Structure formats: structure tokens, C-alpha cells
Image (spheres, coloured by chain):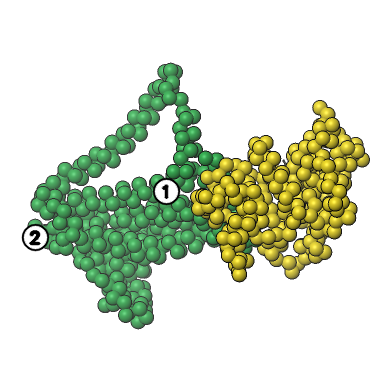
Chain colours: A green, B yellow
Amino acid sequence: MRRSTSRRDRGSDRPRRSRNPSDRLFRGATLGFALAILGLALLVAWQLFIHSKLSREQFGWSFLWTQTWDPVAGQFGALPFIYGTLVTSVLALVIAVPLGLGTALFLAELAPPRLSQWLAFMVELLAAIPSVIYGLVGIFIVVPWVRVHLEPALSGTLGFLPLFRGAPYGVGFLTAGLILAVMVVPFITSVSREVLLAVPRVQREAALALGATRWEMLRMAVLPYARSGIAGSILLALARALGETMAVTMVIGNKPQIAASLFEPGYTMPAVLANEFTEATDDLYLHALIEIGLVLFVVTVLINGIARLMLMRLAVPAGPVKR
Amino acid sequence: MHLLPDLKKALPARASLAPTPEEAPEAMRTEALSAWFGPHQVLHEISLRFPARQVTALIGPSGCGKTTYIRCLNRMHEVVPSARVGGKVLLGGEDIYAPKVDPVLVRRRIGMVFQKPNPFPAMSIYGNVAAGLRLTGLAKGRSLDEIVERSLRQAALWDEVKDRLHQPGTDLSGGQQQRLCIARTLAVEPEVLLFDEPCSALDPVATEKIEQLLFELKKRYTIVIVTHNMQQAARVSDLTGFLLMGDLVEFGRTESLFTTPKDPRTEAYITGRFG
Ligand SMILES: Nc1ncnc2c1ncn2[C@@H]1O[C@H](COP(=O)(O)OP(=O)(O)OP(=O)(O)O)[C@@H](O)[C@H]1O
Ligand SMILES: [Mg+2]
């Protein structure tokens, strides 16, 4: 990889081993903390793994693609929850990506600096609102609005698509996706804004000096330079959407089904965990829930890992670095 | 340290048929050009005349306003927030700061090469050269490939990169990157080329290559070059201007400025007594 040089350089600055005892102590302590965090993550994974034993042995891989969720009959399949999680998260991104990127572009490129800082601060505040508040707003404001206005309007105009057919319930995939979109927009906006602001001035000026307009400069110099960071921000938002529990539980309807229509109620992995944990009286039920937790854990860790890698690539200077 | 004898050696023997700076028609001119950063005035009413197809060098100590001046010439100065310009820059007799003039079009006519090579890292060598053409569809009627090859040849880079046109531009050495940036500027066929210390990040061999390139380019383009290196100014330029703290102290033919400076401050600077 062409950007590996500087990473190597950075590594070579570090002394391999210091003879100073306080240095060694410091090194040992920080290494210990770092390992403890890693150990904690592994411990979580391990616990999820052993406590889902019954379910894994009974259903095997078919757990992932079975639709039945019947605690009375002892039949457990995770597919409706996986489906609900993916559909709501993808829907959230479909809405949040254009909105978040548009806002980031405005804040980084067009808004006067003072206004930009102030608005960026407000956007970051959105991320600090507890998700149960989003859930409440969802129940009392968004659900009725979706039922009365949005869903009839959508089925009136786009009703030829199976996605927008059926009775308007208000609670369902669509509302959950909307709420999630608002919740993840701040991640996309604030990370992308930082990434855009970090594009070096010489890159912008190179484009301008060639006779680029402002928009052409964005397309030619700024966006390509920032693209991996922007992609990273989207993946972080996705990871957040996949794991969001409270707000989604409150507006999705909590019905384990796979439905083509976004108006239908559904269920997600975090929501079923939160709702049914206390009711899980027999061991198989409990183990099936924990296995859902394991699936969720694996998916979010994978996505976060990819996001981190992309951000890391961005942190390495990509400018005129000599090989 | 006395530089004068060295500088005399560096002066090229003028080819007898080339027009002298006085005879050459004017390509560009500044009239009482001033520039500000916020309240801070960094250029004071500079009037200069750039003859067509000649190289004009600007020298002066660090911070005297060379970069600011050259950036005023293609309306790049105003890109900096709070920056302001006064006076006129006439290109072919027309003021590029007139209210109805679009800075984007000005920059297409007046190309600029920066101090540090700045190829687009996300683009290939080919993509970098083609970048300006893709903006406007300037390449209509002719193939992009042809223009890319021609520009790379003019920048004396073609032979070194012709087998790897589709590798990233940032894979090249610093000197090659700078010539890539020159090729990128040439591709849109500007009338004037501005160079802001184009060799300051390069080693002597790469510097020599760029200087030779300037001799070729001046057959077709009017060139303005900022340099810290007085030997370089003496080697490559026909005319030299000396700036000090935002004022133009002296301007004239390179050989007379370096051999018989009229202003004592110029003499002090070129003999290395300050700056
Ligand atoms: N972006 C800026 N904002 C405010 N002041 C600036 C800015 N850029 C330059 N200046 C000031 O303008 C003056 C002229 O700077 P300029 O960069 O034109 O000098 P220079 O002759 O190119 O110097 P050097 O040889 O070091 O490149 C300096 O006093 C500098 O501090
Ligand atoms: Mg400068």
C-alpha cells in the first residue's frame, strides 16, 4: 500500500525498550490498561458464546434463517429480527446520508465560519439527547404524523411499489427508520465536517488555479480527498443504527415478522433482547435471546472495525508524500 | 559573502535574435497594485510590466510579499478570507479585477504552479493532467490522450511516466510531482504561467530540470517566477524585480539589476548583506 511509508516512520520514532525504570512502569501500566479493554471485549464475546450453547446446539446455523419465533413451542429463529434491524438501519442511512452530507458540506464549505461552528455545536447536541427522549417524541409526534400524513401520501404516490402498500399503522419499519435517521445524522455531519475541513488548502487551491468553480473544486479536490473519512462516518452511523434499542422498541411495533411493506410493524435484534429478557423463563428461550445478542455483537464489531480502518487511512497524510 | 561574481557567471549569454525585454510586446501589467490581509497592507501600489514570452523573476527577503503579489495576478489572493486587492492587473489590456470579470475564467488564462508539489492524491498521473480539461470539455474535437501526452512532453516528464500513466500521481518523486503539476497547468493552455518558488522543495538535479524547462516554456508562454535563490533568478530570467516590505524597490533587466543595481538596498540584498 502506498501510504504505508509514513506509518512505518511513525513507528520507528518509538524507542524499542527503555532502561529507565519509570518509563518501563509507565509502559507496563498503559499496556495493561489496553489489554484489559481488549480482554473485556473478548470476555463479552465469550460469555455470549457459552450462554447461547443450548440454542446453538439445537438450531445450528439455521437459527440465522428461520422465521419462527415461538417461545411456547420452543421454536426460535432470528431472521425477523435480523431483517428488522437491517431494514430499519438501511432506511435510516438512505435518509441520513444525503441529509448529513449535505449539512456537512454546507457547514464546511459554504457557511461563514462563526455560523458553521455554532451550527456544528447544535448538531453535536442532537447526538447527546438520550434515546428514550427520541422514543417519546416518536410515539407522541412522529407516529401520529406518519399514520395520518406520510403513509397515505406515500401510498398515494408511490403505492405501485410493494414497499409503500398496506394499511397505515404509524408504528413500523418506516417510523423506526425515520427516528433512527434523525439519531444518526449528527454522526455523519460532525465527522464529515471535520474531514472536509481537514482537506489541505493547497489541494483546494490546486483546483481553483486550474479554473475550477467552487462546486468543481469540491468534486475534483475536496470530495476525493475526503472520501474514505466520509465513508467512515457513514459506517459509524450504521453501527449506531444497528445497535439502537430504546427509541426503536418504542416505535417499531415489536412484531416478529418479515413484511415487504415499510408500513408494517416489525422487530429488531436489540429490541427483542430488551423486551423479552425478563420473560425468558426456560433455558432454551434465554439461550436463543443470547444468541441474538451474539449475532448483533459480531455484526457491529465487524462494521466498527471497517469504519476504524477507513478513518485510519485518512489520518495518514495523503498529500505529496514521496515514496 | 559576495555573490556578484557568481551571479555574473550564472547570467546566460543572450541569444542575439531573441527580442530584448524592451522590444517585446506587453502581456500583462499591474497598475498601483495593493493587497491587504484584513487591516494589514502587505503590498503598496506596485506597478510592473511583464513582456510577452519573457521570464520575469521576483526576488526579495522572506515575508516581503512575493507570494501575495503573484497570487494577485490570477485572482488567487481573494480566496483567503479577509484578503483584499486594490489597483489594476491588465491582461492583454483588460483589467482582470473589473466588476464583470469572472475569476474562474481569469484563472484558466493565467496558470499557477505552487511552491510545494500538490498533485491530486486520489487521481492517477493521467487524471491529474486531464483534470483541468475535464472541467470544461476544453478537449472537444481533440482527444484527451493527445493533450495529456503533449502536456507531459512539454513538462519533460513523458519519458519517465509513459509506462505508468495510470498509477497515482503521488507515487512520483518530488521533482517529478512538480513537473506533473506543471503539465497539469499547461494542459489547459493558459497564456501566462506563474511559478511561486517552484524549486524550493527540490534537490539541485530536479531544480536544474525545472530551470531547463523554463527555457523551453518561455518560447510559448509569458512567465513570472518567484524565487528565493538569486542564482536561479540570474540564470532563468530576463527581467527581475526586487521587493522589500511590500514595495517594489527596483525593476529592470536581470543582468543590469545583478551587476549594476541602482538602489543601495538592492545591492545590499544581492550581495547578501541582509535578507
Ligand atoms: N493568510 C495570511 N493572513 C494574514 N497575513 C498573511 C497571510 N499570508 C501572508 N501574510 C502576510 O503577508 C506578508 C507577505 O507574505 P508573503 O507570503 O507574500 O511573503 P513572501 O515574500 O512570499 O515570503 P516567503 O519568501 O517567505 O514566501 C507577510 O507579512 C505575511 O505575514
Ligand atoms: Mg512566498
User: Residue A3: image x %, image y %?
Assistant: 47, 43
Given the image, on which type of amino acid does mark 1 rest? Met
Q: How crowded is mark 2: few (under 14 residues within 10 Å), some or many (20 or more)?
A: few
Observer able to see residue A18 = yes
Observer able to see residue B251 = no
Given the image, on which type of amino acid does mark 2 rest? Val
Q: From the viewer's perspective, is residue A40 above or below residue A140?
A: above
Q: Is the CB of mark 1 within 8 Å of ligand 1? A: no
| Residue drawn at x 19%, y 44% as measured from the top left | A49
| Residue drawn at x 60%, y 45% as measured from the top left | B176
Residue that lies at the very extreme toward the bottom in this rendered image: A156
Residue that label 1 marks: A310
Lateral position of residue B181 relative to residue A47, left or right: right
User: Residue B40: image x %, image y %?
Assistant: 76, 48
B93 or B103: nearer the viewer? B93
Lateral position of residue A311 relative to residue B123, left or right: left
| Residue drawn at x 21%, y 53% as measured from the top left | A292
* Contact flag, marks 2 and 1 (Cβ < 8 Å): no
Nearer the camera: disc 2 or disc 1: 1
Residue that label 2 marks: A72
Figure quadrant of residue B139: bottom right
| Residue drawn at x 90%, y 39% as measured from the top left | B261
Under tag 1, what secondary structure? helix
Total numbered circles: 2
Specify the subunit that label 2 lies on.
A
B185 or B58: nearer the viewer? B185
Quadrant, the N terminus of chain B: top right
Lateral position of residue B91 relative to residue A65, left or right: right
Under tag 2, what secondary structure? loop
